Image (tube, rainbow, N blue to C red):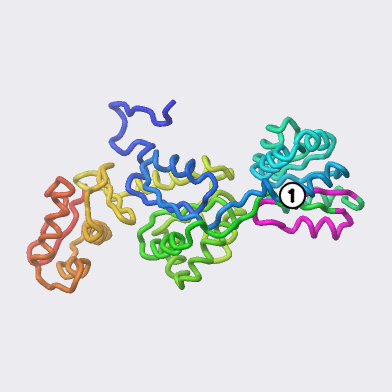
Amino acid sequence: MSDVAAPSSTQAAHPALGQVMAGATVLVTAERRASELAAALERRGATIRHAPALSMIPHVDDQTLIAATRAIVAAPPDVLVVTTGIGFRAWIEAADAHGLAEPLLGMLDGVRLVARGPKARGAIQAAGLQADWVAESETSAEVAEVLLSEGVQGLRIAIQHHGAGADGLDEVFEKAGAQVASLVVYRWGPAPDPAAVRDSAHAVADGEIDAVVFTSAPGAEAWMQAVEAEGLVERVRARFVDGATVAAAVGPVTAKPLEHRGIMPLQPERGRLGALVRALVGHYEHIESVALSTVAGSLVIRARVAVLDGQVLPLSPTGVAVLRLLAAAAGDVVPREEVLAALPGDSQDTHAAEVAIARLREAAGRRDLIRTVVKRGYRIELA
C-alpha cells in the first residue's frame, strides 16, 4: 500500500507528505542499507548523493572467526553479548558455511543471551533463540552497567562486536574478573570511493547539500575526518550549526563524533532508519510551515533549487542565488547593486540585473512575483 494518501479537495494546497523534501539534496554517508535509505528519501522528493565514508568487510571466510566459533562451541560461555543484529546474523551465516550452525545454535540455546538493543534481539529471535535481557538504550554502557551490577567474577563472557571492533566491554569485564572471548564478525574498511567522500565534503562546505545523513558512529567519524583532512571543518561546522545544512544521525551513539566537534545533529526518538526518515520529513514539514508566503504561493529555498507552491523551479545556480537574496529580504527592496553582486563576473550593467530578474519571473510563471521598484531595485511580492 502506498504511504501517501490522495489529497482531498478540502486539504490545503501544499506538497503531499511524500514530496515535502522536493528539491532537497541529501548526502548519504553509509554503505550498508544505503539503497533502502535513499529510496525512502526519494519517495519524499529528495535528490540523493551517495558518498559512503567506510566500507563493510564481512568475515564469512575469516579463519580467526571460525576458530573462535569452534572454541566457543567446545567451551560454552555463561553469557553472550550480541551488540548488532547484522553482526549476529552474519556470524550464524559464517558458521553455517563451515558446518557449524547447528552445534553453535544448540550451544547458544543454553547460554544467557544479552542483546544491545531491539535489533540485536530481533536477530536472536530470527535464529530461533530468545534474548534473556535487552538494553533498550542500545548502548554498551547499559550492558556493562547491568552485568557488572550482577557480578561477572569468574564468568565466561563472549562478545559479538560491531564493525568498529572493541568498544570497551572486553576490558571492563576482564578487570571485573571475567574471562572474555571476542568475536568480530565484520569490520569497517576504507571508503570505497575516497574521491567521492572528499568531493562530498567540499559540496557541503560550498552549500550544495541540504542534509547529511549518518547511520553509524564509525561512519560519522570517518566522514568528519575527511572534512578535517580537506581543511574544511570550520566551514562545514558553520553550515551545520546555523542550520543551512542539516546533520541527521540515527541515534545518540552515531551522533557522538559530531557532538564532539560542536555539531548537534537532528535525531529521531528511536534509532531506526524509518524513524530517521520521519525525523527529516518532520524537519522539512516545519520548514514548509514557515516558508515565505508570496503571491505565487509558499516559497522555500534549498541548497541548489527553489520550490514555489510545491513545484521545483527550473533555475540555474545563479537564479537560485538571486532568488535567495530576494527571499532573505522578506519583501523589502533589494538594491540593483546587490543583485549584480550575486551574478557571475563583476558587471555593473543594470541590464544584467534586469535579465536575471526576467528569468526568475519566467521560471516562476508569475511576473508579479518580483516587483521592480523604480530607481531602487527589486522586491518579492508577499501574500
Magenta run includes residue 168: yes
Q: Residues within 10 Å of mark 1 (few under 14, many from 20)?
A: many
Q: Which residue is mark 1?
A: 65
**Residue 131, position as x, y percentages in the image:** 75, 36
Magenta run includes residue 195: no
The magenta span reads 155-179
Q: Is residue 13 above or below residue 27?
A: above
**Residue 359, position as x, y percentages in the image:** 14, 54
Q: With 328 as the anchor, is 154 left or right in this view?
A: right
Q: Secondary structure at mark 1?
A: helix
**Residue 225, position as x, y percentages in the image:** 53, 66
Q: With 181 as the anchor, is 6 left or right in this view?
A: left
Q: Residue furthest right?
A: 154
Quarter of the N terminus within the rendering: top left
Residue at (44% x, 44% y) in the render:
38
Q: With 262 as the anchor, is 156 left or right in this view?
A: right
Residue at (41% x, 58% y) in the render:
245
Name the kind of residue labelled 1 in the image.
Leu
**Residue 361, position as x, y percentages in the image:** 14, 51
Q: Is residue 221 above or below residue 300?
A: below
Q: With 328 as the anchor, is 245 left or right in this view?
A: right
Question: In front: 99, or 41?
Answer: 99
Residue at (56% x, 54% y) in the render:
55
Residue at (18% x, 62% y) in the render:
333
